[in-house]
Amino acid sequence: MKSEKAKGRRKFMKNTIMASFSSIVGMPIVFGSNMPKELLPIGFFDGSLPPDLIGKSNLLTVLNDRPVNAEAAAHLLDDDLTPNDMFFVRNNGIPPVNVDVNKWSLTIEGESAKQSKTYTLQELKTKFKQYTLNLTLECGGNGRSEFNPPAKGNQWSTGAVGCAAWTGVRLADVLRDVGIKSNAVYIGYYGEDTHLSGDAKKNTISRGVPINKAMEEESMIAWSMNGKDIPLLNGYPLRLVFGGYPASCSGKWLSKIVIRDRVHDGQKMKGKSYRVPCKPVAPGAKVKDEDMCIIEKMPVKSLITYPKTGATIKSTEKLPIRGHAWTSADSISKVEYSIDFGGSWHPCELKNAKNRYAWQRFSAKIPFPEEGYYEVWARATDSNGDRQPIILPGWNPKGYLNNASHRIAIKVI
Ligand SMILES: Nc1nc2c(c(=O)[nH]1)N[C@H]1C(S)=C(S)[C@@H](COP(=O)(O)O)O[C@H]1N2
Ligand SMILES: [Mo]
């Protein structure tokens, strides 16, 4: 028989757990005392998601749950701005727990900083001018699953991309407030997530961007996504956002930025991480680390978000299609579609972006000559004249930068 003391302790534990459940669900769990202790409230995780995916849609495809990596299928990314719960998650470690926004601060330091300075979140919000920009984030490994020979790592399909309205301050304004020495070359970030090993001394990831990218007017330190707090999994309460560069540069749970007099040498800046062969190599080739170059600008790309692949349409009707196109250049200049496996291309309608590095909406109404199976392909060209390839671009050891045309299947009956 259990002692009264042990029973009391269990009851205390249960009440504490119930209180934290209630705070996450956002209201009291009325019959909580009846709830078997093995159960997690289903409202925690939208039905089918593991509790680690709090705040995310249960329609996401979970590629990995430790660390969490999840993406949305192409047709789920149809909104002009990607809803917070549909935005992909790419974690290298474990997000911080019990974030206290009132205590959150950001320190700027480094060899090329004129001083070391710490700002509370509140100071960032009041001291600097605020901006809201639509910025596209795409993981350098988006589309990795198509490479052959296969590349190790999360097997992203097409969904490690999203475009949200980010609110925050310009990184340049904050860096200038601290003072930048003339020998500055790069900035690096540090976040408050924990290494999978649990070792507090190890960084999960600490990447960055060249100083000229950091100083662009679209480079942001953001605390809000689509008018709401950034979801915990996407970096709550503070993150960097760099459109046009691999999303790995956009540090989440941001607590420190270093201004460096050399290329930042933090975790995942070296070896094969986020680097590609400086010169093209044959598929499957072994590449020496010294022949690998850091990925900077992301290539032009597009995604068909309507209809869903496999859709059926009557031969008497025109098929409406739409999607998004994005680039690290100033803008997308055209998007075309093909229904004859690239034999001929036809222009899509294209909307202007709200600002640089926002994705741009394209659409078309497609007539089909007769009944049968078709594929709709889309390809974008940007203002630099760069165009998406139809087949897989250069193989590389870690499967980065796949910007091949997106294809959907259509049955015409
Ligand atoms: N602190 C921290 N920042 C991070 C990461 C991380 O694991 N920890 N992952 C990076 C990578 S590889 C990507 S692709 C983006 C993903 O951002 P998202 O999860 O908000 O979509 O965050 C980047 N910033
Ligand atoms: Mo990434």
Image (cartoon, grey):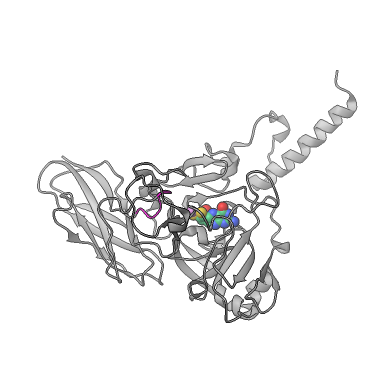
From this view, report whether residue 188 is shown above or below residue 142.
Answer: below
Residue 201 point in image, percent of width and height? 70, 52
Looking at the image, the residue that sits furthest to the top is 1
Q: Is residue 372 magenta?
A: no
Residue 327, quarter of the rendered image: bottom left
From this view, report whether residue 58 is shown above or below residue 348.
Answer: above
Q: Give the left or right position of residue 91, taking residue 18 as reference.
A: left
Residue 374 point in image, percent of width and height? 18, 44
Q: Main secondary structure of the magenta part?
A: loop
Residue 358 point in image, percent of width and height? 40, 66
Depth check: give the residue in front, 287 or 377: 287
From this view, report whether residue 322 is shown above or below residue 147.
Answer: below
Looking at the image, the residue that sits furthest to the left is 369
Count of picture labels? 0
Judge whether residue 162 can be spotted in this image: no
- Which of the image's four quarters has the C terminus? top left
- From which residue to which does the magenta span run? 397-402
Residue occupying image coordinates x 66% and y 46%: 24
Q: Give the left or right position of residue 239, taking residue 397 as reference.
A: right
Depth check: give the residue in front, 279 or 114: 279
Residue occupying image coordinates x 54% and y 73%: 185
Judge whether residue 284 can be spotted in this image: yes
Depth check: give the residue in front, 229 or 338: 338
- Which of the image's four quarters has the N terminus? top right
Residue 6, quarter of the rendered image: top right
